[in-house]
């Protein structure tokens, strides 16, 4: 892995969930759909107008990735942390859960977490989204409803991160470039894919 990309360069982020579905349509127009598993996040970042020094720093970081070869982490602007203003503590999973589940229990967190917040389990790099609000009370078990289903099993020592959630990603293109403006500033658009 090759470092962490600062989001100070960027003014917008487009975050997309990509799932895999197989669709078959018969001659009678009956449609069958099957989820074949596998989900990942795609993020497109648009930079602010960068001065020459900022552009050089960002281009050096991106070029160092060798196109799609290397991976790095990024905390998406705004959406990298919970919307809740009162979430505290570190929720810890209370038992072992197998891959494929979408509901887990944890305790040790306080305050609320919101539907749509991103979370990460400490034992693997996959990022999940909460599908229901959680009102944590520090002492009892709280139910975490997530999507996609667990990619990897988790144990009773796994913690849950909900602030500054680092997405492990790689560039989606082997080319890296920038657009120069007549005022001497430049702009860069970066597209990355979750590296699971």
Image: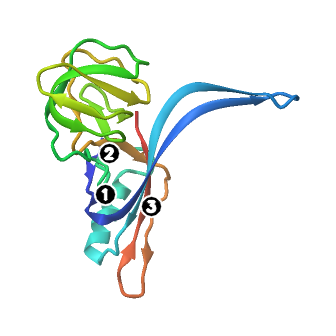
Question: Measured from the top left, where is residue 168 in percent x and y?
Answer: 34, 41
Cα separation between marks 2 and 1: 10 Å
Task: Find out whether the residues at labels 3 and 2 contact each other: C-beta distance under 8 Å.
Answer: no
Front-lying residue, 190 or 130: 130
Mark nearer the N terminus (1 vs 3): 1
Q: Quadrant of the C terminus?
A: top left
Find numbered disc 2 in the image and state the secondary structure of the residue it sits on: strand
Label 3 belongs to which residue? 176
Which residue sits furthest right? 27
Drawn side of residue 107 relative to residue 120, left or right: left
- Compared with residue 6, is residue 188 higher up or lower down, i.e. above or below? below
- Compared with residue 11, is residue 44 higher up or lower down, i.e. above or below? above
Question: Measured from the top left, where is residue 111 in percent x and y?
Answer: 16, 36
Front-lying residue, 20 or 79: 79
Label 2 belongs to which residue? 72
Question: Measured from the top left, where is residue 92 in percent x and y?
Answer: 18, 23
- Mark 3 surroundings: few (<14), some (14-19) or many (≥20) residues within 10 A: some
Task: Find out whether the residues at labels 2 and 1 contact each other: C-beta distance under 8 Å.
Answer: yes
Tell me where residue 13 sits by quadrant.
bottom left
Cα separation between marks 1 and 3: 10 Å
Residue plotted at (32% across, 70% down): 55
Residue plotted at (25% across, 37% down): 113
- Mark 2 surroundings: few (<14), some (14-19) or many (≥20) residues within 10 A: many
Residue plotted at (43% across, 18% down): 100
Task: Find out whether the residues at labels 1 and 3 contact each other: C-beta distance under 8 Å.
Answer: no
Drawn side of residue 25 relative to residue 95, left or right: right
Front-lying residue, 25 or 84: 84
Residue plotted at (59% across, 25% down): 36
Label 1 belongs to which residue? 61
Mark nearer the N terminus (3 vs 2): 2
């Amino acid at each position: 892995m090759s470092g962490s990309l600062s989001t100070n360069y960027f003014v917008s982020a487009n975050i997309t969930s990509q799932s895999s579905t197989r669709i078959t349509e018969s001659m009678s127009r009956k449609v069958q759909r099957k989820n074949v598993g596998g989900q990942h996040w795609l993020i497109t970042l648009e930079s602010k107008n960068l001065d020459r020094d900022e552009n050089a720093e960002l281009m050096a970081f991106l070029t160092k990735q060798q196109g799609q070869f290397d991976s790095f982490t990024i905390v998406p602007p705004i959406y990298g942390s919970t919307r809740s203003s009162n979430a505290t503590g570190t929720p810890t999973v209370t038992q072992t859960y197998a891959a494929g589940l979408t509901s887990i229990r944890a305790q040790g967190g306080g305050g609320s977490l919101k539907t749509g917040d991103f979370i990460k389990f400490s034992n693997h790099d996959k990022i999940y989204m909460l599908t229901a609000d959680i009102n944590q009370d520090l002492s009892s078990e709280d139910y975490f409803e997530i999507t996609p289903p667990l990619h990897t099993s988790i144990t009773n020592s796994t913690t849950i991160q909900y602030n500054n959630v680092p997405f492990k990603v790689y560039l989606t293109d082997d080319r890296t470039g920038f657009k120069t403006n007549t005022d001497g500033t430049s702009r860069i658009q970066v597209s990355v894919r979750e590296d699971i």
